[in-house]
Amino acid sequence: MEIRLAFPNEVDAIMQVMEDAKKCLADAGSDQWQNGYPNADVIIDDIISGQAYVALEEGELLAYAAVTKSPEEAYEAIYEGNWQAGESEYLVFHRIAVAADVQGKGVAQTFLEGLIEGFDYLDFRSDTHAENKVM
């Protein structure tokens, strides 16, 4: 699997993966991502910000994620439990999506593992909607 920063000319392919993920969520009964978010403008902003990553095999775009660096306001206060790494710098995974034809085949896990290995961080965070059981 090739993992790299996304290019602006890949927005359409990324949006197809996002639409696949939106359908998967809707089919599972989740209302997450059913209101027009994320849209192409969000993906373009991710690309311009240098935080848009894609996973490809044989040139086919399989997965997408935005990777942001700490600090992030949403993680400043947690209400149950505590962070294992305390106040260390961390990366946050957002907008993780996988193409329909490879959903359930371990692509997301391989993609996230590859992203983790590619960054010199010890702490990684992500959150999701309560009804997003696959995440």
Image (cartoon, rainbow, N blue to C red):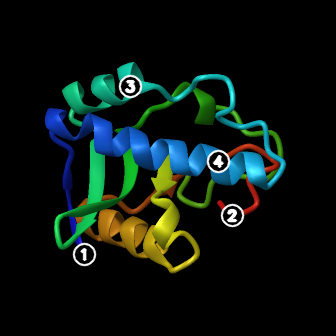
In this figure, what is the number of numbered marks? 4
Residue hosting label 4: 23
Circle 4 crowding by C-alpha within 10 Å: few under 14, some 14–19, many from 20: some
Q: Residue at x 31, y 45 (%)?
A: 13
- Tags 2 and 1 in contact by the CB under 8 Å rule? no
Whether residue 92 is visible to the viewer of this picture, yes or no, is: no
Give the alpha-carbon distance from disc 3 to disc 2, as whole Å. 23 Å
The Cα–Cα distance between marks 2 and 4, rounded to whole angstroms, is 13 Å
Closer to the camera in the image, 48 or 8 = 8
Residue 26 is left or right of residue 6, and the answer is: right
Cα separation between marks 4 and 1: 24 Å
Give the amino acid type for the residue marked by disc 4 in the picture.
Answer: Lys
Res 134 label: 2
To which residue does mark 3 refer? 40
Mark 4 or mark 1: which comes first in sequence?
1
User: In the figure, residue 33 lies in which quadrant?
Assistant: top right
Q: Residue furthest bottom?
A: 105
Q: Residue 133, located in which quarter of the rendered image?
A: bottom right
Q: Position of residue 90 (x, y in %)?
A: 42, 48
Query: Which one is earlier in the sequence, the residue at label 2 or at label 4?
Result: 4
Q: Earlier in the sequence, mark 2 or mark 1?
A: 1
Tell me the distance, in whole angstroms, between the alpha carbons under discs 2 and 1.
21 Å
The residue carrying pointer 3 sits among few (fewer than 14), some (14 to 19) or many (20 or more) residues within 10 Å by Cα, namely some
In this rendered view, identify the residue nearer to me: 13 or 114. 13
- Up/down of 28 relative to 58, above or below: above
Left or right, 47 with respect to 81, comes to left
